[in-house]
Image (cartoon, rainbow, N blue to C red):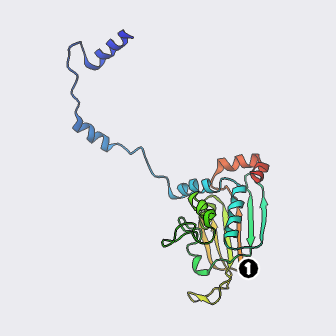
Amino acid sequence: CAEDLAQGSKLAFGSPGALAPRMDFKNLGAKSSAQTPSICRLPTQAAEAVRGAVVVPSLARAVEELVLNALDAGASRVDILAEAPSGLGGGSIEVRDNGRGISPADFAALAECGATSGSTPTSPAGAGEGGAASEERLASGSGRGRSLAALRAVAGRLVVSSKSRAQGEVGGRSARQTWSKEFERGEVVHCGPSPCPRGPGTSVVVEGLLAALPVRRRAAAGDPGGELAA
């Protein structure tokens, strides 16, 4: 060990007693600044998929989030249709409720990253309906709106259709008209009056749940029962 240390000293500083070489810190800084940064931002779509996978890591969790959304909206009935992953399909979900519904004026922000009806700039998260439960959901990154944004990021197709129980008009549009918003691979392909009217409440259809997460999709396909039992 002593010989190794001595040899290392000679390699670093030359013969014993020689002065250590002087470092050119000025040029070193210039070289470092010219190097390509080693920390880079993920593309927006990839970053949203990573966040979405945390909120809805499985088919069972996605169903749970949508049912909680329905209960937050005051639904007294919630119908659930779920299909376990098969092959590389990733599974599908449909959750229908008879809650308050979504106003046409809110569809522009629906399922957008950072948009939620669980809190507002003037009211604390979790205040009002939902209480401590809503506060806990917001703190964990879910809550109304956030789970829809997560599903938009990870699913192949997401369709939200809703008819509000509110009366009158909002922005020149009937508040009682059925509206829908459809996403394909995270991109909006339709936002407006729905071609399929429904009663008051909301329907959420998710197809290809893990389309943006191929590794997790293959794992789910290998254990479809686990996805439903999670």
Instruction: Name the side, left or right, on which 31 lies relative to 58.
Output: left
Q: Residue shown at 72%/73% (left/top)?
A: 75
Q: Is residue 216 left or right of residue 125?
A: right
Between 186 and 166, the one lying in front of the other is 166
Q: Which residue is mark 1?
A: 196
Pick the residue in front: 6 or 26: 6
Which element carries disc 1, helix, strand or loop? loop
Horizontal and vertical percent position of residue 124: 52, 68
Position of residue 145 measured from the top left corner of the image (x, y, whole percent): 60, 67
* Residue at image point 58% right, 62% down: 138
In the rendered image, which quarter is residue 33 located in? top left
Residue 175 vertical position relative to residue 52 in the rendered view, above or below:
below
Against 188, residue 2 (above or below) is above
Work out whether 175 lies above or below 138: below
Using the rendered image of the protein, determine whether residue 143 is visible from the camera's viewpoint.
no
Using the rendered view, name the quadrant where residue 110 is placed.
bottom right
Q: Position of residue 31 (x, y in %)?
A: 29, 39
